Image (tube, grey):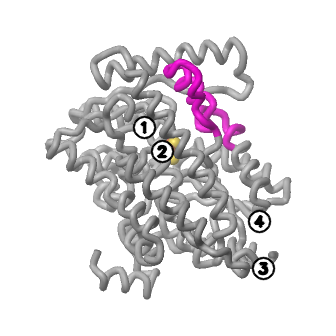
């Protein structure tokens, strides 16, 4: 990192343009924490490192979802997962333009899809990772993107839906579990050529995931008494992206988390911080408009609760494939919005939160319906909610969005 650039960004955060700038800026504002610096480095070089290892050492890797269970399963199959939604933060306006002009995606198509398509387009003809594991649970824009990429020479495998409705229990759930086990074997066959899974490798991944979920839970608890030590962007990246795919380097990620817990345990509690903190819940996924997090920090807020809080462990006592299938259906992302709402509500109760930010992407009809339902539900409970629609950031963050975030947090501060 150039010292001048980093200093310039700290002196004038408004000059930040790209997501990479934000990561550099975060490194500077966390210079007191070796753990944060280590984890931010892992985040920064996540995709390029995996691609380089693939090209230079032949280390197997593939693109997949960032869902909690999918990267875990890919690791157990001996591959390194790249969460394709992470490609967005390497994107620029040219990528968006390629999607719109070359592939004829309508302008109003979700920016996440357009950024990913633009990034994959850049790799056509290059010697690099060409396998994409996906599912049909996602959305039509992504399904369309995968069909296009298949025609462009990518090898795409889409397994069926993992949806579980809120009333699905008993016999119906058992049928789903059997169905999921077959799908897991389908994935294994596509990835490795063999319709079987190394059960010990899968168990090892369960142990790692459970261990890390407990550590992340501990970290979130420590953040309640140290609300400003790890800032919003870093927290959400360490939690959502890191806990899901370990930034491609599981051992280093776990070392970083251990170190961060140690730092927080040794850091004295500042009573002034506890007086002024406004606990806020982040009710979105991993928003790729990093300026939103900075706006929360600048206004004095602290994201302490998350929709993707680690809340359910894998059952290590079951046969591994069954445990994997039950974990998939026990996850909030396995379907109905009511599961997500339960997570948000439990975070809200855990923290005595003052407000919630519901974040989704413009053009996403799926999340906008859920967000509106959540907003109404929590409003009725007296919890102020801000329903934000953003996009994958290409270029400087949207000024109007930042103004809304700041005004919301300042409103919570004034009613404190
Ligand atoms: S935000 Fe919505 S439209 Fe965009 S990729 Fe996700 S599900 Fe699809």
Q: Earlier in the sequence, mark 4 or mark 2?
A: 2
Where's the C terminus, which quadrant?
A: bottom right
Do the CB atoms of the residues marked 2 and 3 lie less than 8 Å apart? no
Q: Residue 251 at what x, y percent from top left?
A: 38, 48
Mark 1 surroundings: few (<14), some (14-19) or many (≥20) residues within 10 A: many
**Residues shaded magenta:** 312-340
Asked where in the image residue 266 lies, by quadrant, the reply is bottom right
Residue depicted at 63% across the width and 26% down the height: 164
Q: Which mark is residue 104?
A: none
Figure label count? 4
Do the CB atoms of the residues marked 1 and 2 lie less than 8 Å apart? yes
Q: Residue 107 at what x, y percent from top left?
A: 42, 52
Do the CB atoms of the residues marked 4 and 2 lie less than 8 Å apart? no
Q: Secondary structure at mark 2?
A: helix
The CA distance from mark 2 to mark 3 is: 36 Å
Mark 4 surroundings: few (<14), some (14-19) or many (≥20) residues within 10 A: many
Residue depicted at 27% across the width and 30% down the height: 155
Callout 4: CB less than 8 Å from ligand 1: no
Q: Which mark is residue 414?
A: 3
Based on the picture, tell me whether residue 412 belongs to the magenta stretch. no
Q: Secondary structure at mark 3?
A: helix
Q: Earlier in the sequence, mark 3 or mark 1?
A: 1
Q: Is residue 314 visible?
A: yes
Q: Secondary structure at mark 1?
A: helix
The CA distance from mark 4 to mark 1 is: 34 Å
Tell me the residue that label 4 is attached to. 354
Q: Which mark is residue 71?
A: 1
The CA distance from mark 4 to mark 3 is: 11 Å
Q: Earlier in the sequence, mark 1 or mark 2?
A: 1
| Image position of 413 (left or right of 185) | right
Tell me the residue that label 2 is attached to. 244
Asked where in the image residue 158 lies, by quadrant, the reply is top left
């Amino acid at each position: 990192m150039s010292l001048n650039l980093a200093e310039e960004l700290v002196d004038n955060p408004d000059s930040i343009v790209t997501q990479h700038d934000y990561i550099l800026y975060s490194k500077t504002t966390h210079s007191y924490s070796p753990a944060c610096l280590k984890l931010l480095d892992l985040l920064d070089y996540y995709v390029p490192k995996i691609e380089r290892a693939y090209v230079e050492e032949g280390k197997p890797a593939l693109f997949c979802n960032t869902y909690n269970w999918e990267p875990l399963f890919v690791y157990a199959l001996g591959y390194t997962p790249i969460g394709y939604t992470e490609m967005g933060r390497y994107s620029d306006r040219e990528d968006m333009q390629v999607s719109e002009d070359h592939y004829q995606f309508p302008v109003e198509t979700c920016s996440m899809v357009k950024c990913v398509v633009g990034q994959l387009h850049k790799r056509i003809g290059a010697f690099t990772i060409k396998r994409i594991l996906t599912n049909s649970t996602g959305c039509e824009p992504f399904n369309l993107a995968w069909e296009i990429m298949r025609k462009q020479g990518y090898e795409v495998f889409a397994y069926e839906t993992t949806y579980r409705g809120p009333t699905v229990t008993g016999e119906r759930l058992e049928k789903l579990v059997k169905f999921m086990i077959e799908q897991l074997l389908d994935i294994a066959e596509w990835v490795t050529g063999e319709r079987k899974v190394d059960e010990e490798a899968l168990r090892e991944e369960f142990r790692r995931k459970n261990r890390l979920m407990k550590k992340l839970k501990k970290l979130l608890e420590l953040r309640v008494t140290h609300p400003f030590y790890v800032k919003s962007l870093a927290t959400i990246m360490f939690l959502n992206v890191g806990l899901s795919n370990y930034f491609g380097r599981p051992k280093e990620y776990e070392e970083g988390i251990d170190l961060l817990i140690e730092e927080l345990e040794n850091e004295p509690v500042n009573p002034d911080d506890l007086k002024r903190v406004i606990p806020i819940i982040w009710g979105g996924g991993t928003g790729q408009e990093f300026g939103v997090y900075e706006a929360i920090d600048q206004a004095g807020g602290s994201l302490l609760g998350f929709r993707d809080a680690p809340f359910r462990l894998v059952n290590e006592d079951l046969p591994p494939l069954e445990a994997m299938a039950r974990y998939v259906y026990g996850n909030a992302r396995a379907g109905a919005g009511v599961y997500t709402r339960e997570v948000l509500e439990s975070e809200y109760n855990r923290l005595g939160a003052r407000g919630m930010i519901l974040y989704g992407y413009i053009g996403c009809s799926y999340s906008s319906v859920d967000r509106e339902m959540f907003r109404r539900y929590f409003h009725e409970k007296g919890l102020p909610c801000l329903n934000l629609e953003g996009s994958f950031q290409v270029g400087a963050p949207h000024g109007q969005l930042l103004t809304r975030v700041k005004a919301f947090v300042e409103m919570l501060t004034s009613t404190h």
